[in-house]
Image (cartoon, grey):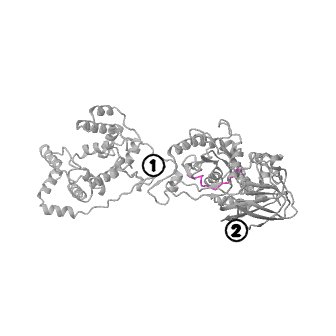
Amino acid sequence: MRHTPLVLVLALWLMGLGADRFRNWVQETQIPPLAYETGAEVRDRNGALLRAYTVDQGRWRLAVDPDKVDPIFVSMLTAYEDKRFFDHPGVDLRALSRAAGQALWNGRVVSGASTLTMQVARLLEDGSTGQWQGKLRQIRLALALEQRLSKADILTLYLHLAPYGGNVEGLRAASLIWLGKEPARLTPAEAALLVALPQAPESRRPDRFPEAAKTARNRVLLRMARDGVIPARAAHTDQLDPAPKGRFSMPLLAPHLADEAVADGSGRVDLTLDLRLQRSLHDLTQRYMADRDPRLSAAVILADHSTGEILASVGSTRYSAGQSQGFVDMTQALRSPGSTLKPLVYGLAFDQGLAHPETLVMDTPVQFGRYAPQNFDGIFRGELPMRRALQLSLNIPVIRLSEALGPAHLMAALSKSGLQPKLPSGAAGLAVSLGGVGITLRDMVQLYAMLANGGETRALRWRKGAAPPEATRVLSPAAAWHLGDILSEIPPPPMSGPPGRVAYKTGTSYGHRDAWALGWNGQYVAGVWIGRPDGTPVPGAFGGDLAAPLLFEALSRASAAPVPLPAPPAETLLMAHAALPQPLKRFGDRQPKEGLQILFPPSGARLTLIENQIALKLRGGSPPYTVLRDGALLATGLYDPHYLAPVAGTGFVQFSVIDAAGQSGQVQIEVQ
């Protein structure tokens, strides 16, 4: 039996069955499970592949949409493997008869009769074709498949299960690994290679046997030209194309965020990331860190601050287990933010009526209990404007403001901004404003997105299609604009363009463990962290020197032209120091005669608007008083503790009152 051609035996056996017995034989066929596993995929906002994952045993098998396969491949596949695929019932009787006749005449198998459906049957059961029982099982299963599935379904099974050498299965994985491209657009030579490989996937692997792969490819091209599937000239020209001689790497962009995205078991996740930006910032970060201490890592996030969509996220310099611990996602690691929280403190002080950018503040030795803050350089600069104090990132002025606001107020603002800060001691102290708290880079970018977005915060999001989160107001538009105006005047790093285009702040944590830079322009916000993931010091590392150049380069790659910062809101108090109300001219340690109180309205009250005014009643403090509504100046020089404050409409309103001694009071009400 060994020497008798299998096709002849099977042909005779099938012809010997009666019609009813044959029909019952096919209908009683046990079909194996038709489900197959495909690797998870993470794609960008436009559907481009960012990262793919293997299935069991490390095999590459990716989902294939037949509509996104170049028609030239399907035409060549069916013409070469199974000319009557769309007409036969699973077994091509004409091909079977031809093969049987050739076998009888020549005494050996000259041509095969295996259809694509029979090949799918073998792939579903991983069966052998070397024995007549195995071939018979394929025929039976192929006939049963044709009765229960459409031709499109059978072709789809082939596109997913065909072997392409090594751990590569299915057309799409093969196209990406052997050609470095999706199968949507293929040249005749590329399509021919993908047709030829499954016939002998191991002996034609391009990475091991490139000449065998090329020979098989050219054989397919010549047959296709002979059969009129492709022009003869195209076959001749494409034979001259070099065949691939190795594997292309699968896309591995935003690997940390991709791991987070598929952690819930999703098969395909579409992100808000932009492939072009992601690749650009990935390559930029690698080049920027290439000649530095190999123990250093870097992380970068870039987002659209108006929508909260993350457009690029680089979690480490390299996604590897080297000295820089590249598998650690440093966008999610809790680190000390250094001085990068200082703008929020100033913004809160502006809103509370404690200060204005031109208010003078003392940069002199001061002590709060046992805590005596020092400036980073140990120098005291005397009296200077708040604007300049923030630009110089001085510690003493911001601690003075923090003491007046209260650390709990700062922590509440961080939580309201959507951040999840972690206090090392469990209790907030004045040092929080200097970085005495753990915050992630992603949270810090969200905080700066709030500043860039006029004081409204939206949770950063990376999953495409997720419902936009509701906006929450943290600062008034005027306070947020003042911060952008102040920070945009900080000189940019060398070779980073003129000042005024980017509002940014740098920070260096205690012991030089973390170097930060965060900033924004008219549309984008970005954050950079550089340091050692294990938290050990990096001597000589400063945010301004180390992280800021990378921040500016990242923002410049987001758009072809600089996006200007916005104009000031209408309610912004723009005036020189000399024109400020007396209480806002200086911020200092002044002792009031009696505490200032807003007796009416009580905070949280709901009041009906009468003639577009709300009556304020004050007690204590030192007149004259200054009154602000939602951070905008209403009146100054008031000596009467009763004041009718104009209100434009309904909704939530915040009133702040400042006396001559610098004391302040605040209430928030709802106007109906």
Image coordinates of residue 209 in percent, x first then y, are 35, 40
Residue 428 is at least partly visible in this image? no
Q: Secondary structure at mark 2?
A: loop
Image coordinates of residue 593 in percent, x first then y, are 88, 62
The magenta stretch spans which residues?
327-340
Name which quarter of the figure residue 238 lies in.
Answer: top left
- Name the residue nearer the viewer: 306 or 606: 606
Q: Earlier in the sequence, mark 2 or mark 1?
A: 1
Q: Is residue 356 left or right of residue 200?
A: right
- Name the residue nearer the viewer: 36 or 558: 558
Mark 2 — residue? 605
Q: Residue at x 51, y 55 (%)?
A: 463
Q: Nearer the viewer, mark 2 or mark 1?
A: 2
| Mark 1 residue type | Gly
Q: Quadrant of the C terminus?
A: bottom right
Name which quarter of the figure residue 665 lies in.
Answer: bottom right
Q: Residue at x 77, y 57 (%)?
A: 627
Q: Secondary structure at mark 1?
A: loop
| Mark 2 residue type | Ala
Q: Residue furthest right?
A: 593
Mark 1 surroundings within 10 Å by alpha-carbon count, few (fewer than 14), some (14 through 19), many (20 or more):
some
Check if residue 13 falls in the magenta segment.
no
Name which quarter of the figure residue 141 lies in.
Answer: bottom left
Q: CA distance from mark 2 to mark 1?
A: 50 Å
Check if residue 335 falls in the magenta segment.
yes
The image shows a total of numbered marks equal to 2
- Name the residue nearer the viewer: 602 or 137: 602
Q: Is residue 540 above or below residue 584?
A: above
Image coordinates of residue 132 in percent, x first then y, are 20, 55
Mark 1 — residue? 47
Q: Is residue 152 left or right of residue 408?
A: left
